[in-house]
Amino acid sequence: MTTDTTNPLIFLMGTTGQTGRLILEDFDKKPEGVRIRVGVRKEADLQRLRAEGRDAVLFDLDDPRTFGPALFGVDRMNILTGYTIAMTHQTKTVVDAAKKAGVKHIVNQGVFAADDATDSKFCWFALVEAYIEASGIAWTHLHPNVFLESFLSVSRPIGGTFSTFWGENRVGYVALHDLAAVTAKVLRDGPERHGSKDYYLSTETMTSSELATALSEVLGRDIRYNSLDAADMEAHFKKGTIAVEDWYARSSLDLLTQFADGRMGYMGTVKDDVPYLLGRPATSVRKWAEMHKTELLSFVDQPQA
Ligand SMILES: NC(=O)c1ccc[n+]([C@@H]2O[C@H](COP(=O)([O-])OP(=O)(O)OC[C@H]3O[C@@H](n4cnc5c(N)ncnc54)[C@H](OP(=O)(O)O)[C@@H]3O)[C@@H](O)[C@H]2O)c1
């Protein structure tokens, strides 16, 4: 397989989101040897990125008419879809377009799934991964476990208490800047080095109680946890306090149910490819909390609702 290895054009999507933003930052820090094109769906983001002097194009996963101009001349791309069942037809159509455009390598942001996973969300990912592989384009699948950044959003420690939906079970985590750095590294190196590879990012496991201890130590405050389960998450969905579309909500409940009854116990295991890709250890939970100390403390200092 021949690719433009000297100065490949890399297409990034999802750069206004929490992972994609960090992937773009990684390339900004080390721009040598690659060209970056960014695809966004909102006009305001397009104008902002162009004002920054970037090669930015209109790109909407729900509008395949935007794919041709966005992927023209692209050598390598990431696929990063949002929290939606639409990821299935979105990935199908964008992979078809990548094939027409002559893209040589797709790096796909997936989940930490077992091959025979039966919960709906992980099945959607298995289907899109199979479709990417069948396209004939070189592929690399990334398999991150739960993002530590969840403790800055859905599980933020308001008033010193965070909520998890795993009961007392051990869960694997990954820091998003590790995931972003791995994505950027794989895109930089290209398909000769990383084609047909699955990389796993479940870099440290903790129970909620261990997490509370780690956060208490790092933040110097008494951090507690609220142990919730699938039924509690369903109540959040019904109340609208966690806003997701219906099919995605159902898939999350399916996952929590299967995790609780033991079918997805692997989510509580370490499988850490970060050192192989970055030549350094993955970021520990405590180190991550140090890095986000100010933000975490701002939640701790908020009154509980
Ligand atoms: N949270 C976890 O613990 C976890 C763990 C493993 C895997 N994952 C996977 O990670 C992925 C989400 O990553 P994330 O948290 O970084 O996402 P995110 O912060 O929600 O960002 C999603 C990005 O996708 C863009 N986007 C959404 N719909 C689009 C469309 N129709 N066309 C073009 N762009 C669109 C958004 O752009 P706008 O700004 O325009 O909305 C945004 O930039 C999902 O596949 C999820 O399953 C999550």
Image: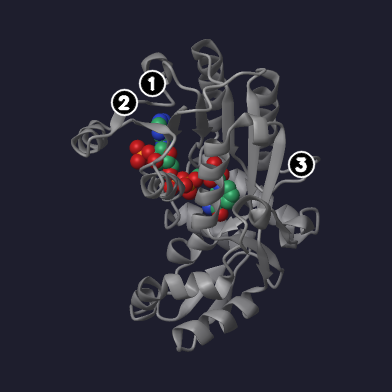
On screen, residue 126 above or below 95 = below
Q: Mark 1 and 3 residues: CB-CB less than 8 Å, in contact?
A: no
Q: For the residue marked with disc 2, what is the amino acid? A: Val
Badge 3 crowding class, 10 Å Cα cut-off, few under 14, some 14 to 19, many 20 or more, is some
Q: Amino acid at mark 1?
A: Ala
Q: Which quarter of the rendering shows the C terminus?
A: bottom left
Please report whichever mark, 2 or 3, sits nearer to the chain's N-terminal start.
2
Secondary structure under the numbered disc 3 in the rendered image: loop
Respond yes or no on whether mark 3 lies under 8 Å from ligand 1.
no
Mark 2, ligand 1, within 8 Å: the answer is no
The residue shown at (66%, 57%) is 275
What colour-coding does the image apply? one colour
Which element type, helix, strand or loop, lies under badge 1? helix
Which comes sooner in the sequence, label 2 or label 1? 2
Amino acid type of the residue that numbered disc 3 sits on in the rendered structure = Thr
Q: Disc 3 marks which residue?
A: 118
Can residue 124 be spotted in the picture?
Answer: no
Which residue in the structure is indicated by mark 2? Answer: 57
